[in-house]
Image (tube, coloured by chain):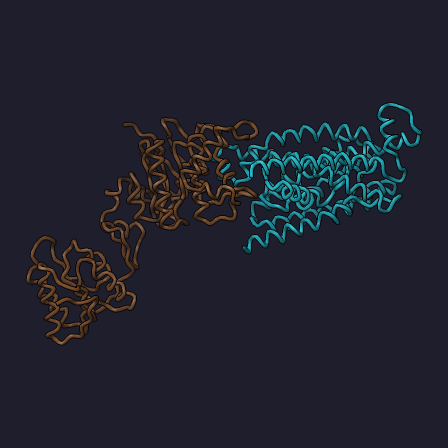
Chain colours: A cyan, B brown
Amino acid sequence: MKRQKKARYAAVFFLLLAGVVALSAVNVCMGSVRISLPDIVKSMAGREIDETTGRILWDIRLPRTLAVLILGGALALAGYLLQSFFHNPIAGPFVLGISSGAKMAVALVMVFLLARAVRLSSAALILAAFLGAMLSMGFVLLMARRVSQMSMLVVSGVMIGYICSAVTDLVVTFADDSDIVNLHNWSMGSFSGITWENVAVMSVVTIPVVMLVFLMSKPLSAYQLGEAYAVNMGVDIRLLRILLVLLSSVLSACIVAYAGPISFVGIAVPHLIRSFLGTAKPILMIPACFLGGSAFCLFCDLLARNLLAPAEISISTVTAVFGAPVVLWILIKRNKEKAV
Amino acid sequence: MEYFFWTEQMSVGYHGQPLIENVGIRLKKGEILTLIGPNGAGKSTVLKSIARQLALLAGTVYLDGRSLGRMSGTELSQKMAVVLTEKLRAEMMTCEEVVATGRYPYTGRFGILSARDRAAVSEAMELVHVTEIGERDFTRISDGQRQRVMLARAVCQEPEIVILDEPTSYLDVKYKLEFLSVLQALRKKKGLTVVMSLHELELASKISDKILCLNGRYVDRFGTPEEIFEPGYIAGLFGISSGSYDEENESMELEAVGGEPQVFVIAGGGTGRAVYRRLQRQGTAFATGVLYRNDLDYPVAKALAAACIAADAFEPIPDCAAEAARARIDSCRRVICCKEAFGSFESVNRELLSYAERQKKEIETIGKRKG
């Protein structure tokens, strides 16, 4: 029995890793211009290939793929942390309005600064997004104090999301024509236009956060049992809660700053991973969620870029198609369990 | 001997509002303390405060000479285990995994179980008899099984003191006894000190070394079961108005039917209890006698009969008692005789029966009458 479980964990991790590697490769290869695998290997080894192909590979495909990999993982992890925090399986940065809050802050800052012809650095964008995320998070926490029902919490999150989106739309309406295209694209959610500088900054922000989250897996496992028991197990609940809020907000902010709000990944991926692993142990869930989020987003971005090529669909459209059924499945399953 | 666990001037409550002030508990190592009191009397509040789930409003709790409030989380978790009424969330966890969470204070940074941790887990499961459900999903077992798994979890935490909030509520009689036996065994083997709340007074009086009585405003009494269970005390503590509780026999009875007795019951030696209760269910007021005060029937008769004619034990029944019984029979329509045969020291009751027969009372006999 125990050996079986270990074999299962190993198999899931192997498949996730293999999925991430394979999907990354496909993502780099496929697009309006196809790049062959040998060419990629050649170019990576430092040998000359066709210049246009090389430019596409190095300036567009590789940074974008890396960004999807990092941000997808971060998004799934942010969802997992929020679900743990609220003891609520359908919590996530998008449904709780945290993404929308971040989006609003970024849009405000963008429009305000672009009007004054100031170029925004990645770090400033992340900071703005983080502040926006914290603002929404603050509202959600206030609501959580008043409503204990999980559905009510989600509803209030969705409402906050609507308010933030309305403000964002208002801002976009008043923005200059040239900015609107950019803003609109971004506010729908898209991984396009990522540069190496972006990748560098997001790595610097995300990777330490992910490591920190992994180090928190033990107290998180106690917290999962319920606060009363966690206290008895010697966990500093206040510190843990603050860390959970901060870290999940940082992760959410990072995603929004670069790719805009992306729906459903934060809920669907942790849930799928949990049922693959057959356990909710954070020490396994944290790395597996990251890999799962990467794979899921790589897959969705692939479709977003290629389905209607050369036009691009917004990433949220694709993630919703695959993610929303999972959420429905969770709700139905929970309802059934309650009935039993 | 010094006290192992004690509180000084402890005040407990919520949001800064004291519910119970000045709680004084003094326990030696290996003693079992039970909190009793009506619903909402503050038992859980006291337990939560001791377990550091609730901040103390005043005072200090000491464990092994040290203030509990000054201990680090890890230190506290190695000394104190809890079984609370709050459900433990165990998503996709087997019972064994739930038990293993008790080892949390002893594992390293990532919580990986060592061989010694695994041994402690299986020993605890063995002790509480949950080994056979180890692989079952924790959310899919019965409440009683869950409670035992929680005890196993507390045991493998290797605490010096364990706090249990109504641990036996969901257990059937077999597991109630087994649960408490395990606590006794742990106390004997490991010197475990136990603080718990129980609703079952008859269990509390049996297992506890000390009992703390709460009435929702203050600690009413703290002492040994003998000191606590004085006649009449429980009815007062719980504010019992319908029915009665008999401290000496640890039994409760429903409310007696009042009014003029319609039926006279001749009983003794435990033969009458079932009849008394049947009459109570039917709503019939009855009188009974003559019973010795140490008779098995006496406590029930005292609780249920509209009139009970009793006599001091180990003495001949005085004539006045017999006279009173005859007067009662006169005013009753019916007489129920629960005795199959009368012994040599029951001549008064035998005469009462023949008196009833002579008075042409309607007579119902329980069991086979001999002679």
**Above or below for A337 versus A180:** below
Query: Where is residue B119 shown, x and y percent of the image?
Result: 46, 31
Q: Residue, x 55% and y 33% (percent of image)?
A: A219
> Residue, x 41% and y 32% (percent of image)?
B159
Q: In this view of the protein, can residue A69 be seen by the observer?
A: yes
Q: Where is residue B64 shown, x and y percent of the image?
A: 36, 28
Which image quarter is the N terminus of chain B in? top left
Instruction: Choose top left, top right, bottom left or bottom right for residue A305.
Output: top right
Rendered view: A199 above or below B310: above
Above-or-below relation of B303 to B92: below
Residue A137 visible in the current orientation: no
Residue A179 percent location from the top left of the image: 85, 40
Dividing the image into 4 quarters, which one contains the C terminus of chain B? bottom left
Compared across the picture, whether A333 is left or right of B238 comes to: right
As drawn, is A10 to the left or to the right of B180? right
Residue at 14%, 70% in the rendered image: B329
Q: How many numbered callouts?
A: 0
Q: Residue furthest top?
A: A46
Give B273 or A249, whichever is nearer the viewer: B273
Q: Between residues B271 and A305, which one lies in front from this camera angle?
A: B271
Q: Taking A84 as reference, is B16 left or right?
A: left
Image coordinates of residue A58 in percent, x first then y, are: 86, 29
Is B316 displayed left or right of A259 in the figure?
left
